[in-house]
Amino acid sequence: MPDAVPGFVPDWPLPSGIEAWQTCRGTGPMPYGGFNLGQHVGDDPSAVAFNRNQLLKVVPTQPLWLNQVHGTRVLELPMREGGGSIEADAVMTTAPDVVCAVMTADCLPVLLADKAGRVVGAAHAGWRGLAAGVLEALIHKMTASVNALPQDLVAWLGPAIGPTAFEVGNDVRDTFVSLDPLNHLYLKPGAADKWLADLSAIATAKLQAIGVSSITPSDCCTYAQSERFYSFRRDQVTGRMATMIWIKPRAL
């Protein structure tokens, strides 16, 4: 892939006709590095616009960039009306060449596709969205759109803050344990009444409970791998990466 678009193809059993791409920080001066895609983080708007345009080297069309609010709203693309910045934390589509994208800098991005290659989706799953049910909402909408079952889906868990770095308070631990007592397995004691949370493990347990069994974690920690990824927890002022998936047009 072109050097102008720092990133990689997620390594997971993608259905035929489906493609995905994960961007990275790239090289450049901090705090925004070389490939920030977030317009809301204080970066030069013209630099962000340039980076977003560079994406067209690896994706077929510009994504609809969401105003992510740590909620559970799912948009089906393409939208038939409206435009601009739309509040949502997940997107899905059954249409070819429509890119589903979420932006992150520690929160967990999750890509989903059905094994027949008919529908794809992406979710922004920070701890709030994960607890509120953003994965359940996305899976419900995706499966309903093609009359599929959760077990017909495959999932990829992208770069996120890892279990040795994501320190949370009792409120976060209590939230997840109230949802499922077994979640205590994914929250280890930290320092001074804090807990170390494993977002990917919690998401995996949620997906399995829904019925998704084909789950591939990236095992990438945004906090630890500063040369590759943005991390809000690490740097506070920082850029945003994009996790994207789309359906290729089928040959006639």
Image (cartoon, rainbow, N blue to C red):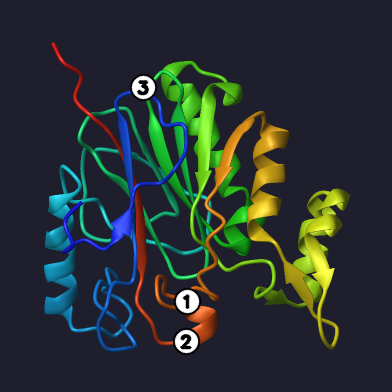
> x, y percentage for residue 122?
42, 45
Residue at x 59%, y 38% (from the top left corner): 215
Labels 2 and 3: the sequence-earlier one: 3
Q: Nearer the viewer, mark 2 or mark 3?
A: 2
Which residue position is annotated with label 3?
118
Q: Secondary structure at mark 2?
A: helix
| Mark carried by residue 241 | none
Disc 2 to disc 3, C-alpha distance: 39 Å
Q: Compared with residue 139, is residue 59 higher up or lower down, i.e. above or below? A: below
x%, y% of residue 150? 59, 26
Under mark 3, the amino acid is Arg
Is 121 or 72 nearer to us in this picture?
121
Q: Is residue 41 left or right of residue 151?
A: left
In the rendered image, the quadrant that contains the C terminus is top left
- The amino acid on which the numbered mark 2 sits, given as a three-letter code, is Asp
In percent of the image, x 70 and y 61: which residue is there?
198
Alpha carbon distance from label 1 to label 3: 33 Å
What residue is pinned by disc 1? 231
Label 3 sits on a secondary structure element that is loop
- The CA span between labels 2 and 1 is 6 Å
Q: Which mark is residue 235?
A: 2
Question: Toward which corner of the image does residue 118 lie, by quadrant?
Answer: top left
Q: Are marks 2 and 1 in contact (CB under 8 Å)?
A: yes
Q: Is residue 103 left or right of residue 71?
A: left
Left or right: 132 as drawn, with respect to 227: right
Q: Where in the figure is residue 34, as x and y percent of width and height?
A: 24, 77
In the figure, residue 221 lies in which quadrant?
bottom right
Residue type for callout 1: Ser
Q: Is residue 101 above or below residue 33?
A: above
Mark nearer the viewer, 1 or 3: 1
Q: How many marks on residues?
A: 3
